[in-house]
Image: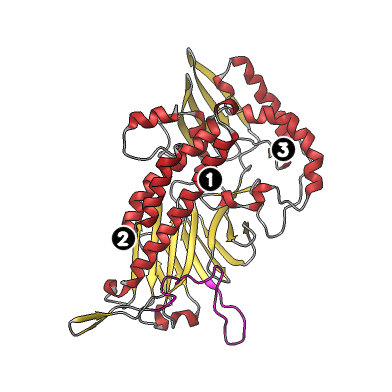
């Protein structure tokens, strides 16, 4: 079905399920060295669409419709596309920094720019003048900001803040693969979880079946009101079953500024170094003060407008060695709900995410299902912080409204017919998670 839909679309993009087509697409893009940030942003739209196609195929396909070999193939293609996309942003960043002096700001003498679209916000600042009074900077167009340690203000460095409105980092996490310190608790609840999983997995799609299956919801509510023994959370490593990244990922990087071109008579000269293509400082790298202590970097992030944070977000940094999110190494957190910003200090530069409790809107406070016609209905869920109304017609559904503190929110996804899987994904991306998972009884 996916291949037929792709054939009918005739949009010139490769079919991600056909190895020859997707491999050719990736190979050609990989070899294309003439890239700037704007071109990467344009290609990104295609890449994200291909990834989304494969992700929904993996979710929707019945076991008999897809082989294990195909499943592994699609997952590998998703990872390759994501890695290639991020590498292209790194390449484009290097290309831009090589000509940073061409975009020198007349007031500060440094370089800064912001580029953004619906998928990404690209912010970069280059320290061309090495003056202490310019150790802090605000990206006005994005609302993000940073304050550098004194030593970095005197160094030829650049700071890039790449906010991807999607999350290609968390799927790599070891904490999603069962790396809990409390395995005994998991074994104790495994049998009970297996008994309940059919009910929990089916809850979101229940209204597409006969009306008698609504009785499953009352069973779910009873399950969610129980107080099962929860497992202890590790003090530093994030449990992604309990806390989920929301609003995308912020890649905050420190770079060594490449040598800038100099005009000498009729010539333009630039110093060439052996490490010219390796400007990236190691993740977490930060300078040390004269007394040997590590100097902190202060970061301010503007929260996305299309996401709801019901409580103060948990700030976490990505640990590439352990392949998980960690909450240590982050301090002095200040959350401004009205301004929709959060400020914190880190011991270095890292990839950062803002996390929210995946179960804060559970259990349901009330629910109603009203028939509005043949194979049509209105499903209303009153959760802890929000009231959600969903229209149902045949095998499609539409978000009618989300009300938080008597105010309608998330207008960007209301009024659009889509599949149940697509609506579930859209609501979860927006921070409204009303969908229990098989492990939810451990946290609610």
- Residue ID at (62%, 81%): 293
State the CA–CA distance, disc 2 to disc 3: 52 Å
Percent coordinates x, y for residue 306 in the rendering: 44, 46
Disc 1 element: helix
Percent coordinates x, y for residue 180 in the rendering: 73, 51
Q: Is residue 378 at least partly visible in the picture?
A: yes
Query: Of helix, strand and loop, which mostly describes the magenta segment?
Result: loop
Q: What segment is highlighted magenta in the picture? A: 273-297
The numbered mark, 2 or 3, whose residue comes first in the sequence reads: 2
Disc 2 element: loop
Disc 3 element: helix
> Badge 3 is on which residue?
441
State the CA–CA distance, disc 2 to disc 1: 26 Å
- Residue 87 lies left or right of residue 294; in this view the side is left
Percent coordinates x, y for residue 204 in the rendering: 58, 29
Contact (CB < 8 A) between labels 1 and 3?
no
| Residue 125: numbered disc | none
> Badge 1 is on which residue?
76
Looking at the image, which residue sits at the far top? 374
Q: Is residue 311 at least partly visible in the picture?
A: no
In magenta stretch: residue 290: yes
Q: Nearer the viewer, residue 86 or 107?
A: 86
Q: Nearer the viewer, residue 253 or 150?
A: 253
């Amino acid at each position: 079905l996916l291949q037929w839909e792709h054939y009918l679309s005739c949009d010139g993009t490769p079919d991600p399920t056909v190895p020859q087509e997707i491999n050719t697409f990736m190979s050609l893009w990989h070899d294309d060295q003439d890239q700037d940030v704007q071109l990467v942003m344009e290609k990104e739209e295609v890449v994200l669409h291909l990834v989304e196609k494969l992700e929904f195929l993996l979710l929707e396909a019945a076991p008999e419709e897809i082989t294990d070999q195909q499943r592994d193939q699609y997952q590998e293609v998703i990872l390759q596309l994501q890695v290639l996309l991020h590498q292209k942003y790194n390449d484009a960043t290097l290309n831009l920094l090589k000509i940073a002096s061409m975009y020198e700001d007349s007031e500060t003498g440094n370089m800064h720019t912001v580029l953004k679209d619906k998928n990404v916000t690209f912010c970069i600042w280059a320290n061309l003048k090495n003056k202490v009074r310019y150790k802090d900077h605000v990206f006005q167009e994005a609302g993000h900001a940073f304050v550098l340690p004194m030593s970095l203000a005197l160094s030829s460095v650049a700071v890039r803040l790449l906010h991807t409105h999607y999350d290609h980092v968390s799927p790599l996490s070891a904490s999603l693969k069962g790396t809990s310190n409390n395995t005994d608790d998991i074994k104790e609840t495994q049998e009970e979880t297996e008994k309940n999983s059919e009910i929990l997995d089916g809850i979101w799609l229940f209204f597409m079946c006969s009306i008698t299956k609504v009785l499953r919801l009352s069973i779910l509510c009873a399950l969610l009101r129980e107080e099962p023994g929860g497992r202890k959370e590790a003090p530093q490593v994030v449990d992604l079953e309990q806390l989920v990244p929301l609003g995308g990922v912020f890649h905050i990087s420190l770079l060594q500024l490449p040598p800038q071109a100099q005009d000498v008579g009729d010539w333009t000269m630039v110093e060439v170094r052996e490490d010219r293509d390796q400007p990236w400082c190691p993740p977490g790298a930060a300078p040390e003060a004269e007394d040997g202590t590590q100097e902190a970097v202060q970061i301010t992030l503007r929260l996305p407008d299309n996401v709801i944070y019901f409580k103060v977000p948990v700030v976490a940094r990505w640990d590439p060695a352990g392949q998980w999110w960690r909450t240590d190494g982050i301090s002095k957190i200040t959350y401004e709900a009205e301004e929709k910003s959060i400020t914190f200090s880190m011991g270095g530069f890292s990839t950062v995410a803002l996390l929210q409790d995946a179960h804060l809107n559970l259990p349901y406070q009330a629910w109603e299902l009203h028939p509005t016609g043949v194979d049509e209905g209105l499903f209303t869920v009153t959760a802890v912080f929000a009231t959600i109304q969903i229209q149902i017609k045949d095998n499609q559904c539409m978000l009618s409204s989300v009300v938080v503190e008597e105010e309608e929110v998330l207008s960007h996804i209301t009024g659009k017919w889509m599949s149940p899987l697509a609506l579930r994904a859209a609501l979860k991306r927006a921070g409204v998670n009303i969908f229990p998972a098989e492990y939810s009884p451990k946290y609610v």
